[in-house]
Image (cartoon, rainbow, N blue to C red):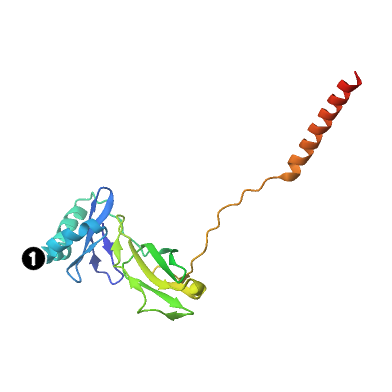
Amino acid sequence: MYLPKQDGSKGGFLHYGYDGMDFISFDKETLRWVTAQPQAQKVKEEWEEDPRWSQGSKAFLEQTCFVWLQRYLNSGNSGLVAVSAEPPVGKVTHKVEDERLEVLTCQAFGFYPKEIQATWTRDGEACKYETLLKNVAPNSDGTYYVQLSIDIDPKERDHFRCHLEHEGLQEPLDLAFKEERAPMLWIHVVGIVPSVIVTGVILGVFFLFLNCK
């Protein structure tokens, strides 16, 4: 995928999938591999043991890859598409540990470019030290996702928001956890009562007829 940047330079990404899911990706700025699945941890450790593997991947993305792309573009058979800024879509979930501890998790996904500011806030103030932020990881379509969690007192839940800032957003996004209520099943008693009354009247007349005979 061809990814032009605002300053006119070019960028690319390198990530691998396994069994239909994102598996591991390369961060060429830090020369580190980012796992998308727990099973990829062993692969990450093996690849990072040899610095030449990461350096070679960086050289491929910054040099070799663009030589190949340029040849492909010049051939007139290009099906490459430029990617514009895509805003994140977010949601907040929770997990109750006990009556005094709850874990709020914010998930932001589908955004591009990779750079995003994501943090938990309490009454508008950033909770930087209490927030557990996982690495930004790529999706198979070239966009990214990130997840951040925070431990809170369930009684304080309404004070917390997931604050997102991204190039694709016209203004920052603040997300709160919303309890999803199960739909209630209502029985239409008014519709049942007349049927019961009518049935009772018919049976009463029938028994009255038998007694009169």
Say what amino acid the circle numbered 1 marks.
Arg
- Going by the image, does 87 lie left or right of 155? left
> Where, quadrant-wise, is the N terminus in this rendering?
bottom left
Give above or below for 82 relative to 102.
above
- Going by the image, does 211 lie left or right of 68? right
Residue 12 placement (x, y as % from top left): 23, 62
Residue 73 visible in image:
yes
- Going by the image, does 179 lie left or right of 20? right
Residue 43 placement (x, y as % from top left): 16, 58
Q: Residue furthest right?
A: 212
Residue 76 placement (x, y as % from top left): 22, 50
Q: Residue furthest top?
A: 213
* 139 or 78: nearer the viewer: 139
* 66 or 100: nearer the viewer: 100
- The quadrant holding residue 139 is bottom left
Residue 162 placement (x, y as % from top left): 43, 71
Q: Residue furthest bottom?
A: 125
Look at mark 1 in the image and give the residue it sits on: 52
- The quadrant holding residue 164 is bottom left
Residue at position x 39%, y 64% in the image = 107
Residue 171 visible in image:
no
Count the labels in the image. Answer: 1
**Helix, strand or loop at disc 1?**
helix
Residue at position x 44%, y 77% in the image = 121
> Where, quadrant-wise, is the C terminus in this rendering?
top right
* 80 or 120: nearer the viewer: 120
Residue at position x 24%, y 69% in the image = 9
Give above or below for 210 relative to 74.
above
Give above or below for 159 relative to 77.
below
Q: Residues within 10 Å of mark 1 (few under 14, many from 20)?
A: few
